[in-house]
Amino acid sequence: MEALFKQFDNFIKRSFIPSTTFIMFFLLFDILLNEELFLKFLREEHSTMIILITLLIFISFSNLLSIINQYIYDDKIKGDYNGKYCFTHNNIELIRLRFKIKTQLQKNNLKDYSIYQIIGKAFKTERYVDEAKSIGITFLSILLVSLLSIIQISIIYNKYWAFLLILIPIIYLIGFELIKSRYRSRAIRIYTNYLFEIKKGEPNE
């Protein structure tokens, strides 16, 4: 029962709540570019069945966003967690601690992701994963609504879409670097705690 509750809790924190961001951006898109067609539909079709179906669709969509987020973001961050384009302020600290961990484990070919698999499970760092998932789904929502906006603008105005298209990779990279920064913070905490535990366990000279 506890395991079931934990899975449900993880779904709420990592998928369902962050997915509400999509609804916010979609409603902005609906108001600004879509003549409020979606809002009109909700106002006209407000029966209990319609509300229930909409809720079920949203829950399914939350799960879909989580799967897509895993593919376009998380699966691309399975090496070292150094920031490359932005949010690089703690790169040096991570590199220094990583070197000490590799020396301690006597394995020089390990990446941050692999080190986490070896020593990370002993430390409570779920909040970093929750934050990373939340950031990923938020930026994925922005990307999807941006694509809808590009399609709508190109149909209505046949201009500005090229500018928005340029924004897509920029939005993606900002999200990617933000997610990596959360995993970087997790790695720094794990490495610091691990080295402290090792030091604490050494006999006094």
Image (cartoon, rainbow, N blue to C red):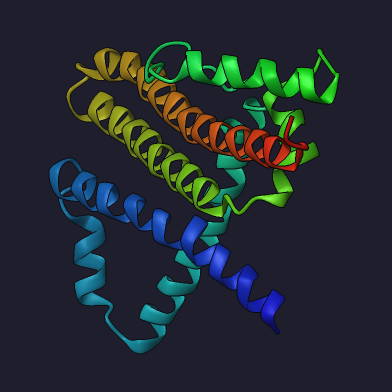
At horizontal 45% and vertical 64% (from top left) the residue drawn is 58
At horizontal 56% and vertical 50% (from top left) the residue drawn is 66
Which quarter of the image is occupied by the N terminus? bottom right
Q: Quadrant of residue 102?
A: top right
At horizontal 36% and vertical 24% (from top left) the residue drawn is 171
Please, which residue is most extreme toward the right here? 106
Asked whether, in this view, residue 166 is left or right of residue 33, the answer is right
Give percent across and percent down for residue 50: 38, 79
Give percent across and percent down for residue 84: 48, 11
At horizontal 40% and vertical 38% (from top left) the residue drawn is 144
Question: Vertically, is 80 above or below 61?
Answer: above
Give percent across and percent down for residue 77: 62, 27
Question: Vertically, is 119 above or below 110?
Answer: below
Nearest the camera: 104 or 154? Answer: 104
Residue 83 visible in the displayed image: no
Please, which residue is most extreme toward the front here? 205
Asked whether, in this view, residue 9 is left or right of residue 78, the answer is left
Nearest the camera: 137 or 100? Answer: 100
Give percent across and percent down for residue 116: 71, 36
Please, which residue is most extreme toward the bottom here? 48
Question: Vertically, is 7 above or below 109?
Answer: below
Nearest the camera: 204 or 102? Answer: 204
Nearest the camera: 25 or 46? Answer: 25
Residue 150 visible in the displayed image: yes
Asked whether, in this view, residue 186 is left or right of residue 202, the answer is left
Which quarter of the image is occupied by the C terminus? top right
Q: Quadrant of residue 143?
A: top left
Q: How many marks?
A: 0
